[in-house]
Image: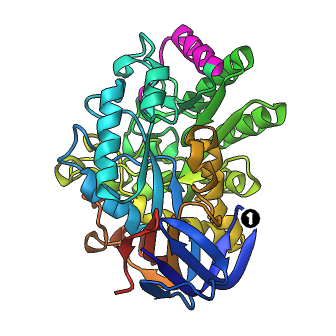
Amino acid sequence: MKILIQGGRIVDPASGMDAVGDVAIAAGRIVALGKAPADFSAARTVNAKGLIVAPGLVDLCARLREPGYEHEGMLESELAAAVAGGVTSLVCPPDTDPVLDEPGLVEMLKYRAEKLHQSRVFPLGALTKGLAGESLTEMAELTESGCVGFGQAEVPLANTQVLQRALQYAATFGYTAWLRPQELHLGKGMAASGALATRLGLSGVPVAAETIALHTIFELMRATSARVHLCRISSAAGVALLRAAKAEGLAVTADVSINSLHLTDNDIGYFDSRARLTPVLRQQRDRDALQAALLDGTIDALVSDHNPVEADAKNLPFGEAEAGATGLELLLSLALKWGQQHNASVSDTLSRITSKPSQVLESSLGTLASSVGRLNVGGAADICIFDPAAEWSVTSDALRSQGKHTPFAHDMSGSLMPARVKMTVVNGQIAFDGLN
């Protein structure tokens, strides 16, 4: 299908392009940027005047809840939420049921996702079989089936020797280990250790749960020369260790969730289970450090940490509720909100959800490396068109995800979200159309 996007403000952080112009698409590829060829005949012309035309968003952490948790979300609903949020590429963790520890399971997931013709899905394989932390998976076979890296999701590795062997193996073959730094025994609480957790009588998760894990990971990286992506850093102390590791030259990247970037433990309020999240929300000094680290590049990417939870599992007392929140449809708005707060340019802001997360994936993308998170003539046409002046309320009706719970819900936050996605194009096909 030939598509002509006319008169939009084209913003591509990877190339530095920021200019009003046209984008011409044919056979799934971008054939022109800036000015369409005179003989280009489009089957669909999109008037993008007043809108921003950007690369499709890249989300490094989104649970699709399938297989195994279809009562909380299905590929159809969650990929529909992704394209409604402008997300054209996403990474899903391996903690499905069954766990993504065999090539057949990964191939089935990718096949199901591709049949829907919506966002590109890049699975993470399990680092250990069943995420049990005892024996390593067949990483080579999982890579051949489509895995872009290997992790433990929310299951910390108690056995440091197993982690060392995993990093040695990954380093040997050039794979990336995706690890959320949390010490097994200290990380079992429900809220960040501090005055609020004490006052509410909630078991606490100390910052040491993150820093101890980070010290271990960095020591093993020095010993193995492995490449590691740190998932959802949550504390100021963790940021300081990450900054030192990068200055040292370790091959480490990191992301932060929209929840930790904008919220604090005070947002728990009177035991509001919508703020029951993993990682736990920490204090204001931690949130401020995370925002500054994303701004200066210490943290590479912003993620939705999309984890839809069914109503029956969320509408419970705080201590019994399931952790998680929907986020795919909020990623763009909350990135722009952060950018506005720090006077960052639109291009600089968008880089945290387009080109920079694509760089984390670059070694695993093969021929897609030049297309994901960027606009290139000849590259795949993955595009997000949004209205930067629009505002919207986060309500159940406004969300396409099967999970309706988020701490950014309008009745909880009281604020409007900036910007609204108007169209999402994936591989040259319109996957979401909010213009009609």
Side of 286 relative to 201 (left or right) = right
Under mark 1, the amino acid is Ser
Residue 300 to residue 8: above or below: above
Q: Which is nearer the eye, 355 or 389?
A: 355
Total marks in image: 1
The colour mode here is rainbow
Residue 345 to residue 165: above or below: below
Q: Quadrant location of the C terminus?
A: bottom left
Farthest right residue? 248
Few, some or many residues within 10 Å of mark 1 (<14, 14–19, 20+): few
Residue at 42% over, 15% down? 133
- In the rendered image, residue 310 lying in the magenta stretch gets the answer no
Residue 179 to residue 31: above or below: above
Residue 340 in percent (x, y) is at 65, 73
Q: Which is nearer the eye, 308 or 375?
A: 375
In the structure shown, which secondary structural element does the residue marked by tag 1 occupy? loop
Residue 222 in percent (x, y) is at 74, 19
Residue 24 in percent (x, y) is at 56, 78
Residue receiving disc 1: 15
Residue at 45% over, 78% down? 416
Farthest front residue? 39
Q: Which is nearer the eye, 50 or 412?
A: 50
Residue 264 in percent (x, y) is at 52, 54
Which picture quadrant has residue 92?
top left
Find the magenta span and give its range: 154-172
